Amino acid sequence: MERPFAITLDVGSSRANKTGSWRTERPVYVHNLPPCSGACPAGEDVQQWLYDAEEGGGGYERAWRGIMDDNPFPAVMGRVCYHPCETKCNRAQLDEAVGINSVERFLGDEAIAKGWKVEVTAPPSGKRVLVVGAGPSGLSAAYHLVRLGHGVTVYDAGPQAGGMMRFGIPTYRLPRNVLDTEIQRILDLGVDVELNRPVTSVLDEMRAGVFDAVFLAVGAHLGKRAYIPAGSAAKVLDAVSLLRSMESEERPRLGRRVVVYGGGNTAIDAARTARRLGAEEAIIVYRRTRDRMPAHDFEVEEALEEGVLMKWLSTIKHVDHGKLIVERMELDETGFPQPTGELEELDADALVLALGQETDLSLVEGVPGLEVEDGVVSVDSRMMTGCTGIFAGGDMVPAERTVTVAVGHGRQAARNIDAWLRNIDPVSPPDRAPSDFEHLNSWYYTDAPRSVQPQLELARRQSTFDEVVGGLEGSTALYEARRCLSCGNCFSCDNCYGVCPDNAVIKLGGREEPYAFDYDYCKGCGICAAECPCGAIEMVPEEI
Ligand SMILES: Cc1cc2nc3c(=O)[nH]c(=O)nc-3n(C[C@H](O)[C@H](O)[C@H](O)COP(=O)(O)OP(=O)(O)OC[C@H]3O[C@@H](n4cnc5c(N)ncnc54)[C@H](O)[C@@H]3O)c2cc1C
Ligand code: SF4
Ligand code: SF4
Ligand code: SF4
């Protein structure tokens, strides 16, 4: 018997029968908020710039420009940001988080190598804003304000711009040529910076300069002191002063045995710096245990590799003539350290106190309405202080003290200052539903182990201030960007186009909206939504 010809339907040939009227639900393409983007304190749309970077070539510049819309320091971020984006990354539940920070560094370095610039396109507003402090927060605010068309003047008390990025973070973590280039790019936009220009009264400066608004970002520079009785011969200094002096001509002399007192990142930087300055022993004394140290674990690890020693559960009682008296502590049931009365001696040529920093708020004394609580200035959701027209951000307001938070405050303040000056509502980001791991079809993604950044060899880490962590090279950065699962946003895999039994998915080919549904033909079966790897399609009830 002759077999019948198999019936085949070309794509689109079944479209004579409109099927859409049966539907109770319809699929829609969504742009949900991936956890990485939600977690970036600088407000970067991480998933979007990773998507651009995945293209390589021209995509890198687009990705960099995407970052620059929110954050003028991609190369700095790629070195010093503690990357909360990675902590939240959905890929961590599959194997390991995407190396977002290392890709950001790659893009920042590409921009420096290729000399990419940004421009001011907004027309001049005629308004003038004073920024006090040229640290990350002040510079970020200045960058956004100038791009929004305002005239910006920055006053900084120090001899160079950068704040703690220059006078705190050591060069082995942030080379100064990288910092200088990213700062210069901001200044080239027309930001006017006056250095060695301490502000003692913000109200006087506002009046004298006839500024329309002020952004305060003076940081926290006063090292906290513990009361430790010290003999006259004792060499006691604070960590921030030590790190600041690294930027001067003469290197500080600390001696062979250096004790650093404290448990934060500054203590780690002080001890690692002491090692590089030639200290044979650099010991961190901390009153609790390692797991309770505020310093980040990877920094503790790097310090230990370099030979920094740790003395846990200890406080310093007295210091004199090359000797410290240390008391052993015990944690009580609440985890609080309690003295035991057991004392021991520790040899030390210098004691470095790294017990945190406070803000010098003398410049805001007498400002009407401005409130200070626990040593920091209160601000509202617009970053405005209690005094109309005076905004503040960074380390001087209540928040986590990081470069990224400071940069984010600068951006947020700039947008609100702009709105306030123009008497309009600030543009708020669109409300996006979160895109959690449960929204992904993880089996569609292949295994791809995270790439590792190279590290300087140990001998050079212990004796030089050369950069410790190296950047990814081009092909590895591309691979790392492609590890992104594109949570909650279409990445043009064609799955929905291929699985739809009714050919109701139309390929538009654009980047913003690559597909559309033809609802005349969609019967609402939901296969596309079920088979989308990244949760970029949702079924919504049909309006009757
Ligand atoms: C040793 C150390 C290491 C750190 N490492 C990291 C890290 O790796 N990653 C990270 O994210 N964060 C790190 N931080 C924290 C981070 O540096 C700060 O949170 C951040 O710099 C705060 O930014 P800011 O703009 O608020 O203030 P700052 O960076 O402190 O800048 C304030 C600026 O204001 C100026 N100023 C102060 N008073 C006046 C005045 N009266 N008039 C005019 N100008 C004034 C200062 O000269 C300074 O330039 C580190 C901090 C330290 C101390
Ligand atoms: S700035 Fe930090 S948190 Fe934001 S994307 Fe970069 S690494 Fe992540
Ligand atoms: S996989 Fe990509 S989009 Fe998803 S959280 Fe991680 S970086 Fe963001
Ligand atoms: S299935 Fe693929 S093409 Fe369709 S929406 Fe999801 S990611 Fe985009």
Image: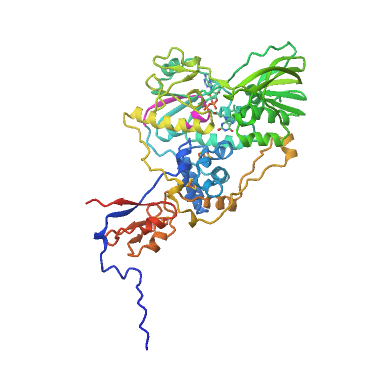
Residue closer to the observer: 33 or 188: 33
Q: Is residue 431 magenta?
A: no
Please indicate whether residue 108 sits to the left or right of residue 426 in the image. Answer: right
Q: Could one spot residue 170 in this view of the protein?
A: yes
Tell me the quadrant of the picture where the N terminus can be found. Answer: bottom left
Q: What stretch is highlighted in magenta?
A: 125-140
Residue closer to the observer: 409 or 33: 33
Placement of 186 over or under 98, stated as above or below? above
Q: Which residue is drawn at 27% across and 57% down?
A: 23
- The spot of residue 93 in percent (x, y) is 52, 47
Residue closer to the observer: 524 or 300: 524
- The spot of residue 400 in percent (x, y) is 51, 28
Please indicate whether residue 240 sits to the left or right of residue 66 in the image. Answer: right
Image quadrant where residue 282 sits? top right
Counting every numbered tag in the picture gives 0
Placement of 209 over or under 275, stated as above or below? above
The residue furthest front is 333
Residue closer to the observer: 507 or 355: 355
The residue furthest left is 544
Placement of 396 over or under 187, stated as above or below? above
- The spot of residue 284 in percent (x, y) is 69, 26
Q: Is residue 131 magenta?
A: yes
Coloration of the structure image: rainbow
- The spot of residue 196 in percent (x, y) is 56, 21
Image quadrant where residue 19 sits? bottom left
